[in-house]
Image: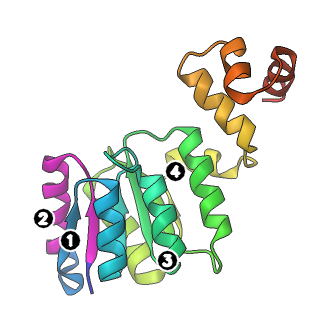
Amino acid sequence: MSILIAEDNVAQRSYLREVLEREFAAHAPVLEAGDGEETVKLALEHKPDVCILDIQMPKLSGVKAARAIWRDFPTARIIFWTQFPHEIYINEIRKIVKSVDPPPAYGFIHKNNPESRFLRFVAAVLEDGADMIDPAFKDSFKRPLLTEFEAEALYYLALGLSNWAIARKCSLSLRGVESRLATL
């Protein structure tokens, strides 16, 4: 039995470890990873009861780490703990969860939540196998999934690329990009 924390911020990782060791002592030890590659390695080696993943980490994002973990450990329970609730991440996580059979238990919570809510999320996913979505993100999880192009185009738009630059990156005509973006 164990819990895995994947967080590149040392202070946040230390805080999580202290809280989880105190509240979920039966699931000790609390394993720690500072980047996505280390996260995958520890998850596959130790098969923790729950993994708590930051989304933006060095070497491999929390989303890509989750994909790798669920590929080889499909029953893994993962909570995405993030400061960056961008639609692109939510869309990608939903696609990954949909591709795992049977669908895994997971959660998605913003880092600014009070400790009590965070602990309820962990308990629900860890002990009940429930899916938990932060109320702030509920609408994002209800929207239809984006196509691969839509997600990619939104990513490039968020980076500030022009329609012409997106067309070049996606090997499409300018008119093709404009018509696809119009559907968004």
Q: Earlier in the sequence, mark 1 or mark 4?
A: 1
Nearest to the eye among marks 3 and 1: give it. Answer: 3
Amino acid type at image mark 4:
Pro
Query: Does residue 73 show up magenta in the picture?
Result: no
Q: Which residue is mark 4?
A: 135
Residue closest to the eye, 162 or 184:
162
**Disc 3 to disc 2, C-alpha distance:** 29 Å
**Disc 2 to disc 1, C-alpha distance:** 12 Å
Q: Which residues are magenta?
A: 3-21
Residue at left offset 65%, top offset 35%: 152
Residue 72 shows which numbered tag? 3
Query: Does residue 7 show up magenta in the picture?
Result: yes
| Among the 4 quarters of the image, the one containing residue 126 | bottom left
Amino acid type at image mark 2:
Glu
Q: Earlier in the sequence, mark 3 or mark 4?
A: 3
Q: Report whether 57 appears left or right of 32.
A: right
Amino acid type at image mark 1:
Leu
Nearest to the eye among marks 3 and 4: give it. Answer: 3
Q: Which residue is mark 2?
A: 18
Q: Earlier in the sequence, mark 3 or mark 2?
A: 2
Residue 31 shows which numbered tag? 1
Residue closest to the eye, 76 or 165:
165
Amino acid type at image mark 3:
Asp
